[in-house]
Image (cartoon, helix red, strand yellow):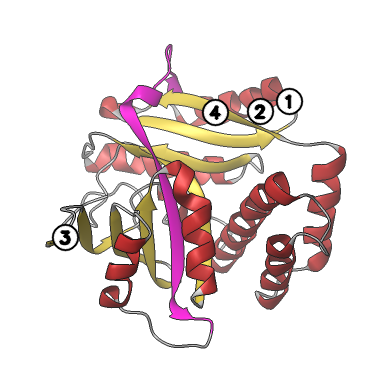
Amino acid sequence: MLNLGRVISTSSYRSLFLSASTFKGHSKWQNIKATKGKNDLLRSQKVNQILKRVKTAVKHDGFDLKLNRKLADLQLEYKAAGLPLDTFNNFLARLKSKPEQTFYFDLIGPSGSFFIVETEGDNKSRIQGSLTRNLKKIGSFRFAPDSLRNRFDEKGIVKIDSKTKDDKLVKLEDVEELAIELDCEDVSKVVEEEGEKFEFTTSPNNVTKVESALSDKGFKIEAAETELVAQHAISLSAADSALVEKFYESLQELEEVKQIYDNLQTDEGNAATATG
């Protein structure tokens, strides 16, 4: 994330970086050009975001909707978004009977680009086989011989909508002091396909606290998760950017792929997969 703009310090000299408007930088998954239509992609993103939060809620407080308030709230949010409750309930049943595992695959792309692909499923070998077939079709991508995790920092990300639950418009200055109170290191306004959002960056073990506090204060939670942010970003040529976009579009077809992290520049001019 680009930390542009001013720094606000509290009396305890803790600094909060306030970012200017940027395109989504932790992962290009939200910015790729959809091959099946933008509305389908946005719908898929919303489903994934809520179901990922369902996993966290279940992990902490169980499957009973009557006893797990957060899980019940997520079910209502899912319904309010116009998403089929059958999908939500089937996901819960599957999660309870056959828990999915998370697998990460480290890839090297053109011109020193790195990618960590987050997947979910019950068979790592099968997922790797699907990735291998897709990479062969694209070319210029291969599995990294060693882990790339040390080239990324783990960050907790909580994203809220630009409107509150009672439909009031949120401004950056509205959330500055709140971010400091919640021990966040950064709050920024980001531009996504469906409009402006605000992202709070914090430590991974602080995500649940930030999510709960923001929800209690009337903000609409879009996502609350741990993400990988590259320590050093690179820019690509037009030709390599086209390859990377093809890579994202190809992996979008795989149901098991939930998130992709990279080390690419995130400004509109250089982002390999920013849509225009």
How many callouts does the rendering have? 4
Which one is in front in this view, the residue at disc 3 or the one at disc 1? 3
Q: Which mark is residue 104?
A: 4
Q: Which residues are magenta?
A: 140-165
- The first of marks 2 and 4 along the sequence is 4
Does 214 appear in magenta?
Answer: no
Element class at badge 3: loop
Residue found farthest to the top: 145
Q: CA distance from mark 3 to mark 2?
A: 50 Å
Above or below 40: residue 103:
above
Q: CA distance from mark 3 to mark 4?
A: 41 Å
What residue is pinned by disc 2? 127
Which one is in front in this view, the residue at disc 3 or the one at disc 4? 3
For the residues bearing labels 2 and 4, Cβ distance under 8 angstroms? no
Check disc 4 and give the amino acid type: Tyr
Q: Which mark is residue 11?
A: 3
In the rendered image, which quarter is residue 10 located in?
A: bottom left
Q: Which mark is residue 123?
A: 1
In the rendered image, which quarter is residue 258 located in?
A: top right
Determine whether, in the image, residue 14 is placed left or right of residue 201: left
- The first of marks 3 and 4 along the sequence is 3
